[in-house]
Image (cartoon, grey):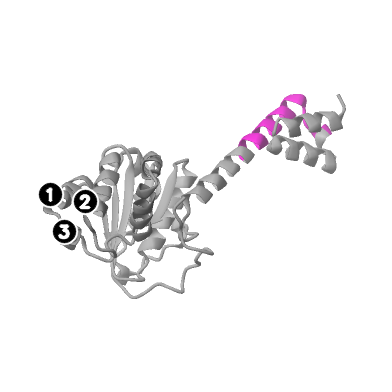
Amino acid sequence: MSHAVLMEKMREMKLHGMLNAFQTTLETGKSNDYTPDELLDYLIESEWSDRGTRKLRRRLHDAKFRYQAGVEELEFSSHRNLDKNLLRRLSDCSFLERKENVIITGPTGCGKSFIASALGHQACQHGYRVLYTNSRKLFSGLKIMKADNTAVRELQKIARQDLLILDDFGLQEFDGESRLTLMELIEDRHGIRSTIVTSQVPVTGWHEMIGEPTIADAFLDRLVYSSHRIELNGNSMRGKKPKIEKEAKMS
């Protein structure tokens, strides 16, 4: 079988990594440097690596992160009250295996969203499905979806995510419908999936912020009491980190 025919079959079978690797060996004249077993091993490893890269790109795209962030970019200045050991433990994503949650609180601009996005990127690299969403946009979007009966499908999609990042929690007022939606979100994930919540409001103020005592108690019980807590201090970090072109939108 000629090289051209072989490459065309690779292309038709969508073996893009294998095709690129094979073309490279031909172009560089290194195809004769491999034994048949070595060449096969090289081609299969190239295909495996290429598929992994493409899967990661899809996970990052589907997550709709607010920031392109990496844990290696985090700043651990003493005034920030950011525990390096805790972040190191969280960055191995074992908290996702244990279905644990993370709560990040602090004043506006102190880096809450960036830390959440960095942990989300890390989760994507470990093969987890992640969704970042702004709380206000999420709840207002779900209200619109309920009008045309698509909210159930969206909630089911959110429930399937290994990690939900709920950013800027508590900036909007909760009405009765939003409280019920919040409870449904957390109930679907409790003990099954992990959630990261960022908020300018200290956890001690969440009960009053939610408003309805029964729902607030249930929410705190399911999310807060067994979570990892990061309580940031310090001045605004804005302008120090690169923002992606646009904020996350609901899919």
Residue at point 87% right, 28% down? 2
Residue at point 30% right, 52% down? 102
231 left or right, relative to 116: left
Q: Which amino acid does the dot numbered 2 rest on?
A: Val
Q: Quadrant of residue 193?
A: top left
**Neighbour tally class for label 1: few under 14, some 14-19, many 20 plus, Cα within 10 Å:** few
Q: Quadrant of the N terminus?
A: top right
Q: What is the distance, in whole Å, between disc 2 and disc 3 at their CAs?
A: 16 Å
The residue segment tinted magenta is: 32-49
43 in the magenta segment? yes
Query: Badge 1 is on which residue?
Result: 214
101 left or right, relative to 58: left
Instruction: Report helix, strand or loop for mark 3.
Output: loop
Query: Badge 3 is on which residue?
Result: 211
Query: For this rendering, which residue is in front, 80 or 96?
Result: 96
* Foreground label between 2 and 1: 1
Query: Badge 2 is on which residue?
Result: 224
